Amino acid sequence: MRVLVVEDEKRIADFLSRGLQGAGYAVDVASTGGSALDCVHSAEYDLVILDLNLPDMDGLQIMEKIRIRKPGPPVLILSARSGLDDRVKGLELGADDYLVKPFAFIELLARVRALLRRGQPAPEKLQVGDLTLDCIRRKVTRSGETIELAPKEFGILEYMMRNKGRPLSRTMIVEHVWDMAYDGLTNIVDVYIRHLRTKIDDRFPQKLIQTVRGIGYMIEAPDRPAEQPTEPATERQV
């Protein structure tokens, strides 16, 4: 999951970025309205956390532009404006939630998770073949066996399962799971895919993670279980 934090106060922006990354999200930070709009136009975000008091434009203007451009990501307003009129105006202009500063991070995280659940058409549990991923409890099982994954492994697997049957480039995976741009040189995706295959595929007859030549990777359940090799029908002379 990829989150855009629009906040000009560096202390708060760093606090939000560290906290959300620790919860398993990829985070971009924009300190101005202009840079926020550039980010929204150049990448896909699952959620925008938006401060209203920015140096170059009002946050409500940014939200209106986001809604005109594409109504996709939910918007959580995070503002020191605590008046009832401000909250009502923000929600009427299209915000999905409104949280007043100062705030407790645990409450913000709960609201983030609620908005992401609401904004995702996919169910809380994803399944490909006998592999199941619980998005809420962050648990993975295959054939009833629990599989322990590191946060980045879980992020890659969740992204792939939400897009099952769709080839995903290394660029797409990096931009959704890491807070960085893919420079064409790093093999970080290949390394993590190897880790995932070791945990998810190696001990099972069906291999779910597929390499798509010239593109990247895809997860998909085979039409039928892999067949075990058999001896030819004719007897071999020894």
Image (cartoon, rainbow, N blue to C red):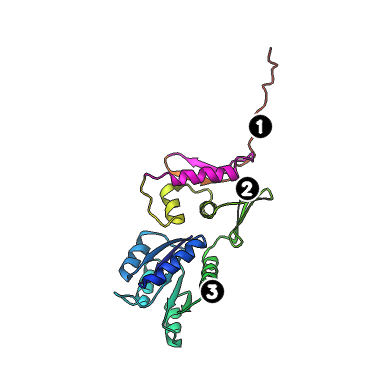
Would you say 11 lies left or right of 191 here? left
**Residue type, mark 1 in image:** Gln
Q: Give how far apart the Cα atoms at labels 2 and 3 are.
A: 35 Å
Are the two marked residues, 2 and 3, in contact with CB atoms closer than 8 angstroms? Answer: no
The quadrant where residue 32 appears: bottom left
Badge 2 or badge 3: first in the primary sequence: 3
Name the residue carrying label 1.
Answer: 228
| In magenta segment, residue 116 | no
| In magenta segment, residue 204 | yes
- Give the extent of the magenta segment: 185-213
**Residue type, mark 3 in image:** Glu
Relative to 190, does residue 65 appear above or below in the rendering?
A: below
Name the residue carrying label 3.
Answer: 107
Q: Where is residue 79 in the image (x, y as percent from the top left)?
A: 42, 78
Crowd band around label 3 with a 10 angstrom C-alpha radius: few (<14), some (14–19), many (20+): few
Name the residue carrying label 2.
Answer: 129
Does dot 2 land on a helix, a strand or a loop?
loop
Residue at left offset 50%, top offset 62%: 22
